Image (cartoon, helix red, strand yellow):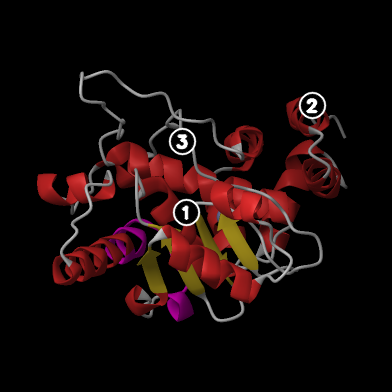
Amino acid sequence: MSSLQKSGETKIEGSGMKFGADGHKEVSNRPEKMSHKEIPVNRQMEAQFKGKISHNKNELTNVRQKKSDIVEGVVKNDFTLSNEKKLDNTRDFHYVGDKEFGNELKKRDTSISEKEINLIRGFHDGKDNQSFVKDHGDTYVTSIHEKLHQKSKSELSTRLNEGITEHFAKERAGLFGDLKNIDKHGKEIPKPESDYKHDVEIVKKIEATVGKDALNAAYFDGKSDVLNGNIDKRLGKGSYNRITDALEKKDYNRASKLLDRQYRG
Ligand SMILES: [Zn+2]
């Protein structure tokens, strides 16, 4: 199981690194569980997440620290973390400029290309549980995504793991007020589609089939057997393996069809 996860999605085979997604166009269904939560971000901080970066060095350090605190708090408050993942990871979460980001990534994955570095907005390294996010533009979904990697105990297959991560990140970001990029003329700037868009669609179907508890157990507590058992109970023996295999191969049609099937056993 690879341990480095990056936003921007490119899997570097055998490198032990995974790339998480960003791009966030659509916002998924909002779960009741989170809907009453207070959003701990004021207008000023919202601007910081949208990429209004200070050029004053001290101020920049402060803002980055505040953002890291917020992201830690959001994930801690709104998700069902396992006890061992409740420890504070604020200092393990780094907002960095593009250059530092590239250097950090190259240090951890010597085979990575400059082109890939440009496409990646954040990554998480499972080896030391450090997360790095490029500090410009709208960093909120990427931040939640990388923080979730830090706080989850997922031993799931790569695409399922990333699909759940992105699904949860977008769900939470939706509560933030559906951040939009607004240009000087007040127009919304279209965002690139998430690289995990299709994985998220499959994860939503899984969630609709077995419920959020089974998904949470697998993702945050490492209990993939709970998810496996629930899916097989609903869709027939072997279904979980068939669905995750299809996902790994990015055969989304097959994964989708398997989930549409009703168990008649
Ligand atoms: Zn990821």
Q: Nearer the viewer, mark 2 or mark 3?
A: 3
The image shows residue 187, relative to residue 15, as above or below, that is: above
* Residue drawn at (39%, 70%) of the image: 93
Give the magenta part as a residue range: 72-85
Question: How far is disc 2 from disc 3 in space, using C-alphas?
Answer: 22 Å
- The residue labelled by disc 3 is 24
113 sits left or right of 191 in the view: right
Instruction: Inspect this view and state whether residue 214 appears.
Output: no
The secondary element bearing badge 1 is classed as helix
Q: What residue is at 43 percent from the left and 41 percent from the top?
A: 170
- Please tell me how crowded label 2 is: few (under 14), some (14-19), or many (20+) other residues with Cα within 10 Å: few
Q: Which residue is at the front of the view, 102 or 250? A: 102
* Residue 197 falls in image quadrant: top right
Comparing 159 with 204, the one in front is 159
Q: Could you tell me which residue is drawn at 72 percent across and 62 percent down? A: 225
Cα–Cα gap, marks 1 and 2: 25 Å
Q: Main secondary structure of the magenta part?
A: helix
